Amino acid sequence: MKSALHLPLIAALLLPSAAAAATCSAKGDGFDGWLAGYKGDLTKAGVAQSVVDSALAGVSFDPAVIKKDRGQGVFSQTFAQFAGRMVNSNRLQVGAQKIAKNADLFARIEQQYGVPAPVIVAVWGLESDFGANTGTFPTLQSLATLAYDCRRPVMFQNELVDALQIVARGDLTPEQMKGAWAGELGQTQFLPSNYVKYAVDFDGDGRRDLIKSSADVLASTANYLHSLGWAAGQPWLVEVNIPGELPWDQADLEIKKPVSEWQNMGITGANGSIPAGDAALYLPMGRYGPAFLAYHNFDVYLGWNESLVYSTTAAYFATRLAGAPPVGKGNGVVEALGAPDIAFIQKALAGQGMDPGPIDGKLGLKTRLAVRAFQIKAGLPADGWPDSALLSALR
Ligand code: CA
């Protein structure tokens, strides 16, 4: 389908919507009036009337989307808990079958984008169980609801405009656009903005179809990871054994050293030799838990999803699909604090003038960096993992 529009410009023209800010309500009162005005704005800005009509006809405010938006649970699982649940024997088996069955396709994808099959398949498995669960929320309705809602209207008005672009260029019909509650689409759950930027037509039918076409899905995922900086032929995460004593403050994703320096400190490969390169010592659960060397490509995972636990799990899943054995338990007993304790720690660290990020009970990268800074100050082993010794020191 030929489109006369330049939708990215339209986003700039329409945003931020004063109308939405003035009228939005969590119950959706006023939604229909807002949508009518918004449709008018879209056509005035150059979106084809036919696209606006087909995409937004019959779209209503969806309270279920708002409920999901307000109800996002605290993600307080550790890497071991989350990976134990997500990287199960069924997913490993199906993932290996997918790789074997699509060997030619993956070879072509790796040649073009530099991303190997296990990395793509691990993401595919985590995001939608290899395409089995892509979501049932009507995307345009979800996005319109969130574009109207007061919490993040600008972001979702942009996503809605990008979703219209997907319709306008004929990749998906409005009816085909079903996905996650927040508008993520397809077998690896692309937000419409990423769909517009990174989706590719790899099966050659002229459409970028991330819902039904596995070839399009897998190549687009590789294209996105490539654009985030994936380095071809390089490792991402390699499990290591660590000695009982180390300068723990050096275990930081932002401190990369040549592998030989880590080896000089007594670090050895858990499964044979360690690939050369620069890597960070990464202790996802502190000094008593599993240990990895994280290479540049691990940073690419954090570009895909900023959650450390998700990224570590996706990267670990990929190592398993690439042949690594199950991760070891580490050198001792890991203490895992619950969300209320994490929130207390965040508050206390913020009170000390540090920046642990939002006080939300989630153990993200910022909180871990602030924990480590406090551990250094307090003379505690500075592995960035909050434990009862840290709690006592902060109390
Ligand atoms: Ca296609």
Image (tube, rainbow, N blue to C red):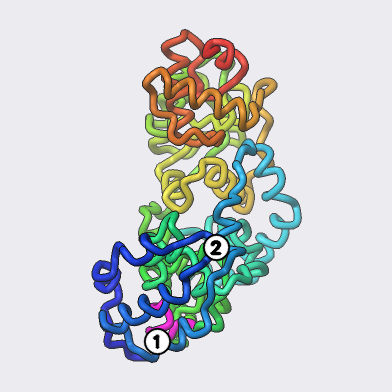
For mark 2, does the 10 Å Cα neighbourhood hold few (<14), some (14 to 19), or many (20 or more) residues? Answer: few
Q: Which residues are magenta?
A: 164-172
Quarter of the view holding residue 288: top right
| Residue 27 numbered mark, or none | 2
For mark 1, does the 10 Å Cα neighbourhood hold few (<14), some (14 to 19), or many (20 or more) residues? Answer: many
Q: Which residue lies under the disc numbered 1?
A: 51
Q: Position of residue 103 (x, y in %)?
A: 58, 69
* 371 shown above or below 192: above
Numbered disc 2: secondary structure: loop
Residue 336 is left or right of residue 234, and the answer is: right
The residue at the point 42 percent across, 56 percent down is 152
Q: Position of residue 12 (x, y in %)?
A: 25, 67
Q: Quadrant of the C terminus?
A: top right
Numbered disc 1: secondary structure: helix
Mark 1: amino acid: Val
| Residue 163 numbered mark, or none | none
Mark in front: 1 vs 2: 2
The residue at the point 70 percent across, 43 percent down is 84
* 97 shown above or below 205: above
71 in magenta: no
Q: Is residue 358 visible?
A: yes
User: Within 8 Å of ligand 1, the CB of disc 1?
Assistant: no
- Between 311 and 59, the residue placed more toward the observer is 59
The residue at the point 60 percent across, 42 percent down is 75
Mark 2: amino acid: Lys
Q: Position of residue 334 (x, y in %)?
A: 66, 24
